[in-house]
Every structure is written in C-alpha cells, then in structure tokens.
Image (cartoon, rainbow, N blue to C red):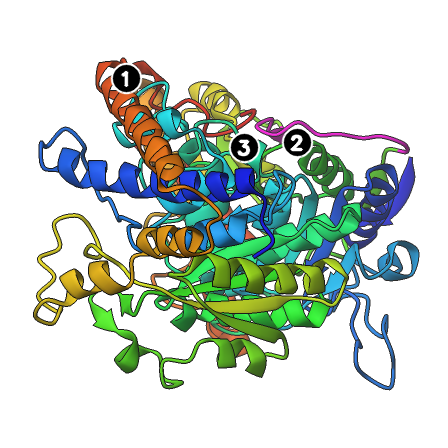
Amino acid sequence: MAIMNIREAISSTLMAEMERDSSIIVLGEDIVGGAGTAGGPEAIGGIWGTTPGLYAKFGADRVIDTPISESAIIGAAAGAALAGKRPVAELMFADFVGVSLDQLWNQMAKFRYMFGGKTRCPAVVRLIYGAGMNTAAQHSQSVYAMLTAMPGLKVVLPTTPADAKGLLTEALRGDDPVMFFEHKTLYGVKGEVPDGEHRQRFGEARMVREGGDATVVACGRMVNFGEKAADKLAADGIGIDLIDLRTTSPLDEEAILDSVEATGRLIVADESPPRCSLAADIAALVAAKAFTSLKAPPQMVTGPHAPIPFARELERAWVPSPQKIEDAVRRALAFR
Amino acid sequence: MQLPRDELIGAYRRMATIRAFEERLHEEIKTGEIVGFTHLYCGQEAAAVGVCDHLTDEDMIVSTHRGHGHCIAKGCDVKAMMKEIYGRRDGLCKGRGGSMHIADLSVGMLGANGIVGAGAPQAVGAAIAARLDGKGRVGLAFSGDGACNQGTTFEAMNLAVVVKAPAVFVFENNHYSEHTGDSYAVGTSNDIASRAEAFGMRAWRADGCDYFDTYEAMRELLDYVRAGNGPAAIELDTERFYGHFEGDPQRYRGPGEVDRLRETRDCLKAFRARVGEAKLLDPADLDRVDAEVAQLIEEAVTEARAAPPPDPADVAQDVYVDY
C-alpha cells in the first residue's frame, strides 16, 4: 500500500497502463501543454496535473495535445477506438461535454448496437467536474446524470485514490466507452492505494458507513459530504448506511435496495439540479422496488433548479452541503 | 490509362452494382416493404469507386447517410446490406442499423452515419491509430457539400493538419445539401477544396462523374498522404440523380434537370464510352457484367424478402460488450 492523492493515483495509473498496453493513447487540450510556445512542450502536463511525464515517456504519437476542438477530440477518440486503439480523451471541464455531445451520444454510445454488436469502442473520456471552486455556471456542473441516461456509455465517479486507480484500470481494460468523472475538489484527497494491479469492478457500490437508521446514497463529492454528516449524526446516536455508488452506469441496485429494506429511509445526495437527476432516478427505483419497506418519503438533497452561481455565498447556497444531508436524514427519521 | 483489363472490369462491376442496387431500392421502396429513411447514391458511383479502388481492407473509411455506394465500393457484402435495409436478423448489422448505419470493420468500413459531419473527426482518429501502426494506412472521410458546413468538419481538418495525421477528406459536391443548393449554402462560391487549403492542407479537384479523373487524382493524393506528408483533401464534382431521401418531391429541381444529368453526367455511360473509344474493353464484356450484376441484385432482394425478421427478445442485446 502506498499513500497518495487522487491526482497521483490517476497519473500513475495512466503511466502504468500506457507502459503495459501500447494501444493506449491520450489526447486533449493542454494535456502536454506549451506546444508552439517558448516554454516548449510539457510546460503544463495538464491543467489538473494528471498527465505530467507522459509526453516525455511516450512521445507525440501517443500523447496528443489538441486544439480547443472538443468535437474533434471526442470524435477522434471514437474513431481511434473503432480502429483498435484505446484512447483516453480529456474534457478539461465536464461542462464542455455540450460542445462534443454528438460524438458521445449519437456516435460512441451507439456504434456497437447500431452495427449489430460487431464493433468495440473502448474509449475512456475523462471529465473534470463539480462545483466548489467558484468557477460559475459553465465550469462547475456535474453532468453525470445526462450521460448515465445514455445506453451504451458507462459512468464512473471515483471518490478515493484506491478507487481512482481501480476504476481507471478497469476502464482501460474493458471494451466499452467509459465516462470517467474526476471532481475538481477531490484531487487532493489522500488515501491508501494497493500496489501492483488493482481493478475495481463496475456496478459494485462501496458501503462507506453502516449505521442502520437511514440509507444515504451518494456519488462523487457528496460521499465526502455524507461522511461529514454521518459524523455529526453519530454524535446524536444516529447511524446511517452511506453508499458510494462508484458507478452510476451500471448501477448497483442491490446495494441500494438491500439497505433501504433494512432502514426504511432513503436520502439521495446529488450535486445537480433536481429534475431528471440521479436523485430522482434512485428515488423512483426505490419507490418501484422497495415501496413497502419505506417508512418515510425519499429525501432528495440536490441543488435548486438554477444554474450554478459564482459568488461564494451563492455557490454555497447552491451546493448540497453536509448540513443539508444531515437535515434530510433528520427529516426522514422524524416522519410519522 | 494504365489499368489492366480485369481492374477495369472490376471498377465497372462495382459502379454498376451500386447503380443497380440503388435503382432497385428506388422501386422496392414504393412497395412499402422497406421502412424508414433511404438516401440513394445514384449518380455518384464513380466517386466512391474511384476513391475506394485505391484502398485496402486495412484502410479505414467513414461514410454518410448516403452511404450505400461507399459500402459497396469498400467491399461490404451486397446481400447482407440488402437484408439490413429490409431490417432482417441476418442483415449486416442484425437489422439494428438500417440504411443509415451500415458498417463492416472487417473491410475497413467504420460506419455510415445519420448525423451530417459526424464522420470527419472519426476519420482523423482512425488516421491517428493507423499512423501508430506504421503500415501506411489512412483514415478517410466521405463528406458532402452539406457536411462541409459543419463545425465538426472544420475541427477535424484543423486537428488533422496540427497532428499531421494520414487523414483524407473526400468532399463529394453533388450540389445539394438536402434541398438547398451549394451556390447558396457553401459561402466560398461553391468551392470546398479551397476551404481545405485554407486549413493548411493540399487539396485536389476532380470530376466525380468520371471514374478515370477521380482515380488518377486519388492516386496522386494517396501517394502524398501515405508518404507521411499529413492530411489531404479532394473535392469531387458529382451529381445526385434522386432526391435527398426517397419520397422527396424535389420541387427544387429545374425543368428537365434530372433528365439532362442522366444524359450528360452519367458516370457509367462515360466509362463505357471511354473504354470503347480506347478499345480497352468490348461492349459485350460490360454487357456481361451488367447481366451478372442484375442477377446478384435480384437474388439479394429475393433472399432479403424471404429472410427471417429479428427476434424482439433481442432488443437490448449488444448495447455493451460487458455490463
């Protein structure tokens, strides 16, 4: 076991997998950084610091700095994957998915199905997402619900360094397109990471806490906030099951339903607006499949039906907080 | 013209197969047996064949909504294509794709596409992949005068130049993007090749209704790209004999326009005239090919009609390799 943060887990996994498999290529804006400048290539190593050293080791044919052309980045990844490579494309901000959506939604996600199951499109798209850095309405969103709704894509959201390694390795060894979400406020989260090969299967949620009084389902940064809420609640003798979904497609329905059947209370923490959200999706799942277990209405802890604002006070008001999760648990427990 | 006799006959056979396939579809669609959208390639056969005759199964192409010609020229199985268009279980894509989504990776056909302009960046990705393997393969995108106005196409051309990918952009200008003329929609005075040049790549221009002109230009172009000079483009001046889609009333056509095109711009007639004048082939050779092609298409339709439909139980199969 080594102690490292999520940023280091991602960059070391990319390095190790690229060494192991020569079909892996990476492409994106400024992932090398500094091409065509006096500072020369490798002036940056990615603005998130997740791709340093790759260019020096693997060269320009496998580590490709692209122009600011998201459709071309994702489209090229789609074509390279069809052609037998394993591209890892970076969307510097997940919000830019809108620029490239067709290549994900109508292309990558559908090739295998449309072409009668004869093709594989093993592309990994890394999307850097989430609020918390006052980056305002076009650089803060968590667009995972939209991509979770698209058949053909897998959606992955690591919250620990060990999972960052395990899930990225799994993505790079699999044969389906994977949307790999990295929360911009979680890069510095430290933890133990298994040495050597470490794969984390998709569709297998992580039970972060076992408390038995209520079930809190979360992903991404909301898992971190759920732990904070759990600590506060524990001080009052309230124990929650906290479930980190790890992947929203495939979804570990069993982990959610098993817990709710035992606790009778569901709280979903989801860093997105409420409509057609992951929270709504999981509330519907539980209502349909564990209706008689419920002792209280499902509680959806989400942002409001509004874009993500800039000012500190406004962004704090938008983002689901540990306090809001705690309040929702108490509401569910108080329901008669 | 240096082509040996069997290659000439092969080129004619591929063009005649596309023509017969599409003309037959035009008739069969009227029966109501074929559902959905179908976009016919008639008139453009010399473009697809003149380009693809230089490609091997290892070279990769992406195609368009008007893709039957590219599929046949690249070597897709004609009977399996017909079954696909009839929505049959044994169709090339199990009846899941239909006319607009035919692909066969075993012959380097990465897919037709229902989204105009979506293919160009994918061809650049295929070219990047091809370069890694170092075998001189190319990634090639067929696009029309419609797709030349999509931002994806611009992004793809720039990216290809920036990374010096062995990518080829083939612009078939049939002068209609759906129902709108290129003199209106292509702002560079109908000139698409100049756009490619503006992105920093070499571009060729050829008559896409003349197999030999297209073939010769593509020979030069591919020599250039395979030698590692980066991407290149070609604009092929061609014609669309039918509407945008089957059922299109074509109110935008001038009086007698299609008859005139069929009289003066038919690539099959031009091919026959050329090889006849040069005494390269006997008309009887080509008549024999026509008869064989007619037989093939007849069998394809008969077999497609009789083929079993897909099983509704398979509706959610093949979404993922593993889920």
Query: Foreground: B79 or B206?
Result: B206
- Chain of residue at mark 2: A
Q: Residue at x 22, y 71 (%)?
A: B180
Residue depicted at 24% across the width and 44% down the height: B38
Q: CA distance from mark 1 to mark 3?
A: 25 Å
In this view of the protein, which residue sits in the foreground, B259 or A174? B259
Q: Which residue is mark 2?
A: A174
Mark closer to the observer (1, 2): 1
Q: Earlier in the sequence, mark 2 or mark 3?
A: 3
Discs 1 and 3 lie in a common subunit: no
Q: Is residue B295 visible?
A: yes
Read off the residue under disc 1.
B303
Question: Mark 1 touching mark 3, by CB under 8 A?
Answer: no
From what the image shows, is residue B5 above or below residue A28? above
Give the number of callouts.
Answer: 3
Q: Position of residue A221 (x, y in %)?
A: 60, 51
Position in image of residue B163 (x %, y %): 72, 67
Magenta stretch containing residue A197, yes or no? yes
Q: Position of residue B214 (x, y in %)?
A: 49, 61
**In the rendered view of the protein, which quadrant contains the C terminus of chain A?**
top left
**Residue denoted by label 3:** A119
Question: For the residues marked 1 and 2, what is the alpha-carbon distance in whole angstroms?
Answer: 38 Å
Q: Residues within 10 Å of mark 3 (few under 14, many from 20)?
A: many
Look at the image and tell me whether residue A269 can be seen: no
Figure check: B155 above or below B101: below
Region of the chain picked out in magenta, as a range: A195-209
Q: Specify whether residue A66 is painted magenta.
A: no
Have a look at marks 2 and 3 and say if they share a chain.
yes
- Taking depth in this image into account, of A70 and B235 the one nearest to the observer is B235
What's the amino acid at mark 2? Answer: Gly
